[in-house]
Amino acid sequence: MLAIWKKELQNYYLTPIGYVFMGIFLLVGGVMFYLGNIMGMTPSVATLLGNLNYIFMLTVPILTMRLLSEEKRTKTDQLLITSPRRIWDIVGGKFLAAAMVVLLTTCCTLLYVALLSRYTNRLYPAAIACNYLGFLLLSLSYVAIGLLMSALTESQVSAAVLTLGVNLLLQILESVFSSSSFALPAALSFLRPVLSWFSLYSRYNQFAAGRLSFANILYYLSFIGLMLFLSVRVIDRRRWSEGG
Amino acid sequence: MSLPIRRRHGLKGECLMIEIQHVTKRYGDKLAVNDATFTIRKGEIMGFLGRNGAGKTTTMNIITGYISASRGTVLLDGYDILDNPREAKRRIGYLPEIPPLYPDMTVNEYLRFVCAIKDVKRSRIAAHLNEITELTGLGEVRRRLIRNLSKGYRQRVGMAQALVGNPEVVILDEPTVGLDPGQILEVRRMIRQLGEDHTVVLSSHILPEVADVCDRLVIIHQGRIVAEDSLEHLTRAGENGRKLRLRIAGPEAEVLQTLRETNGVQQADSLGSREKDSVDYLLQGENGKDIRAAVFHRMAERGYPILIQRPVDPDLEDIFLQLTGDSGEEA
């Protein structure tokens, strides 16, 4: 797993992808920080991370699109699958490489927090840490979704668009169903609590509010685990395929 | 379930390296590989011969564990590729039809990555890579990006990749396709060298390609194994009745007429003139009949000197014709 992790991480910085991803994120993030926190005169880290989260939602697909699709298209997956490594090692290594880039990028945003701390004494380290934890878990969920989409197709572009679509759909579903003004047919009203339980976003809001809950951490970890498991299954399934 | 006990199968004291038993792979309603059974002994160079689309690549993909068979088992040195993939895969180096290369890496970076996924000990990597790059002639390009290498060099990198970890079996899928004649000779030299201490499986759709490096041939046709033998045995039946190529001085129509009337000649065709005042002919004897002497005497009688007479090596199509009665046309 370590070898694959290293190779993918190298690849991010040997090709423009890593720089493009970090560059776009930090550029847009900087503008958002300026508009939201500096111009809005609020020291709230929750506002900052809430905004940054949108950028990740939109840019993580760039990071994950090639991971598995490109291996399949160029048939380099033949090298990986016929090596003694298990498919889990391959998928896990790739996930961790993308996760590493997300983590590095997130670390850059600590600069904003440092700036904010110069202007206010209302920043609580524990609350900020909790907020960042939620932010990272949510971002890694995007990575896991992107990895699964990349396993499903041979085309990088399809993988990116699919990931973006799924991310947006999750977001829309969440806001539609959680708003009380949306009239759900009585027969489907049971969906509301179910969807809000499964929602990636409502749980993030709890982290943002400073509530650290083991159940929520476990939820994100399980979600990521499920996505990785499905990616492994998709790859393994193809080996058994008998379709034309 | 993985069995901890290593199963060995002996045949006259020889170890079997690869055993393929009743392997079938279905794609839709087509059988890409149909009940294939054959074995490969330790240390031999085996040629896997068939036309394009006969099922060679599918079979090799199944042996290496890239895809799974619909039915049947593959044992590598006694380890089942599905039940005990780690042990089985440790013993294989695979060069697929398209070398699995990462264009954004240098040759060195790439080979180091392959070392890492194939469990080569860290301390051994440098020496191991020196050995491999020397054998494959990659010395001077080790620091170059793979994307900038020529096709011949890429093929060598693919070959080097298959040798990483010193696997007991090296499987090469059409290693000479798309190379120029010089490079083809180079690859053959490498394969011969490999054969000295490895088991090599080599696929091709061109008979002469495998004929001079392989100890034994397995011939696959429309997913079925139609023959498994040495080249001599496979072509012996047609040995005496082999095709002859002749260059005879004399008027074309008369010579051709005489050839056709010669005892034992089944077919005679003109190939046109290559040399002044002479015409080339292709002759086919009736099954098993040696027509060389008969043709000589007959031509001498008529006063048409034979300038060249040489047997034509049987090609894949002739062997197919013998084995399957298939005319050689694509189905």
Image (cartoon, rainbow, N blue to C red):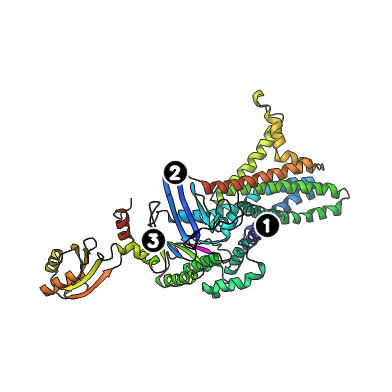
The crowd level at tag 2 (other Cα within 10 Å; few <14, some 14-19, many 20+) is few
Mark 1 on the same chain as mark 2: no
Q: Position of residue B250 (x, y in %)?
A: 14, 73
Nearer to us in this view, A136 or B25: B25
| Frontmost residue, A151 versus A54 | A151
Q: Going from the N terminus, do you reach mark 2 or mark 3 first?
A: 2
- Residue B170: x and y in percent read 51, 64
The part of the image, by quadrant, that contains residue A196 is: top right
Label 1 Cα neighbours within 10 Å, binned few <14 / some 14-19 / many ≥20: few
Q: Are marks 2 and 3 on the same chain?
A: yes
Residue at mark 2: chain:
B
Q: Is residue A197 visible?
A: yes
Q: Is residue B179 magenta?
A: yes
Residue B121 within the segment the image draws in magenta: no
Q: Is residue A231 above or below residue B142?
A: above
Amino acid under label 1? Gly
Range shown magenta: B164-180
| Numbered disc in front, either 1 or 2 | 2
Q: Which mark is residue B229?
A: 3
What's under tag 3, amino acid-wise? Asp
Residue wearing tag 1: A23
The secondary element bearing badge 3 is classed as strand
Task: Where is residue B319? Give x, y as percent.
Answer: 32, 59
Residue flagged by tag 2: what amino acid is it?
Gly
**What label does residue B28 carry, if any?**
2
Cα–Cα span, label 2 and label 3:
31 Å
Q: Quick one: A157 or B279, which is closer to the camera?
A: B279
Magenta stretch secondary structure, dominant: loop
| Secondary structure of the residue carrying numbered label 2 | loop
Mark 1 vs mark 2, CA separation in Å: 47 Å
Quadrant housing residue B318: bottom left
Q: Is residue A41 visible?
A: no
